[in-house]
Image (cartoon, rainbow, N blue to C red):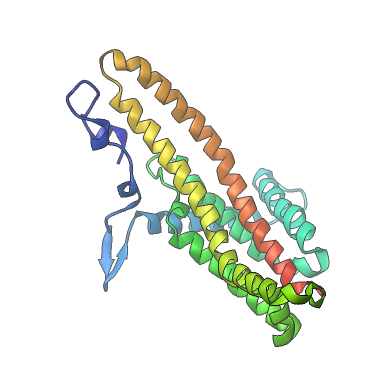
Amino acid sequence: MLAFETDCHIFDGCGFSTVSPGLHSFVFEPMFTVGGFEFNKTMLLALLGSLAILGFFWAAFGNPKVVPGKLQMVAEAGYDFIRRGVVYETIGKKEGEKYVPLIVSLFFFVWIMNLWSIIPLAQFPVTSIISYPAGLAAIVYILWVSLTFKRHGFVGAFKNFTGYDKSLGPVLPMAMTIEFFSNLLVRPFTHAVRLFANMFAGHLLIVMFTIASWYLLNGWGIAYAGVSFGMTIIMTAFELFIQAVQAYVFVLLACAYIQGALAEHH
């Protein structure tokens, strides 16, 4: 719901609770249905975001030049930042090179899904719907588990997941149980929720201050509306920073998990 979709203002006899944002702000009616499959706004934004990323890198690298143009230079800078600053620093150049395409794709996908929050008409971060972060976290989780089994075998993977260390003595069974549940259950959950919760809360705050600005725009409440609108601008600017940080943290953790699967000693 946008602020201008209601005529409810302060001193008009209607309370803010009638227009305030809530969980209903994250529920969208299907745009159309095909064979029982419902396609809504968040799916459209995810699709458009994917096409935008593909189009950007295709335009930048479709016909690469030795002396890069502006678009190619920007794309190379973004690609190289993730490759060197995240993958190489976490996994290492030798082991990490093969995972660069995946991590770069994850970073830019998460970033553009977050950016939809401040783009006019869209005005909604796709990652504030838990299914999207959960799906991305599941990709990383499956890769991490499969790499662990492939590199260390069943016994080695079991030791990896449980943090086996015989020097712990009597507390080893308890420590292994905690590590097992922490690694195989808590880790993928927190990986998804960290992204979801930040984008959910950020969007809710922006919507709240936006609607409050419109609601207070009546009589002497205009003074309060100005303060609320100022907070909307501040929160939007802050959200720009958080959107990039959350994309960075998501891929940084993904690289840390991959590095843990590849490491010889755990």
- Figure quadrant of the C terminus: bottom right
Report which quarter residue 89 is drawn in: bottom right
Up the image or down, 227 lies above or below 149; here it is above
- In the picture provided, is 143 more to the left or to the right than 3? right
Considering every residue shown, the one lying at the far bottom of the view is 154
- Figure quadrant of the N terminus: top left
Q: Nearer the viewer, residue 205 or 116?
A: 205
- In the picture provided, is 88 more to the left or to the right than 34? right
At x 56%, y 60%, the residue is 190
Q: Nearer the viewer, residue 18 or 5?
A: 18
Question: Residue 55, image x and y in percent?
Answer: 54, 56
- In the picture provided, is 73 more to the left or to the right than 206? right
Question: Residue 62, image x and y in percent?
Answer: 63, 59
- In the picture provided, is 150 more to the left or to the right than 109? right
Considering every residue shown, the one lying at the far front of the view is 170
Up the image or down, 171 lies above or below 44; here it is below
Question: Residue 92, image x and y in percent?
Answer: 81, 63
At x 55%, y 35%, the residue is 238
Question: Residue 259, image x and y in percent?
Answer: 74, 67
Q: Total marks drawn?
A: 0
Report which quarter residue 175 is drawn in: bottom right
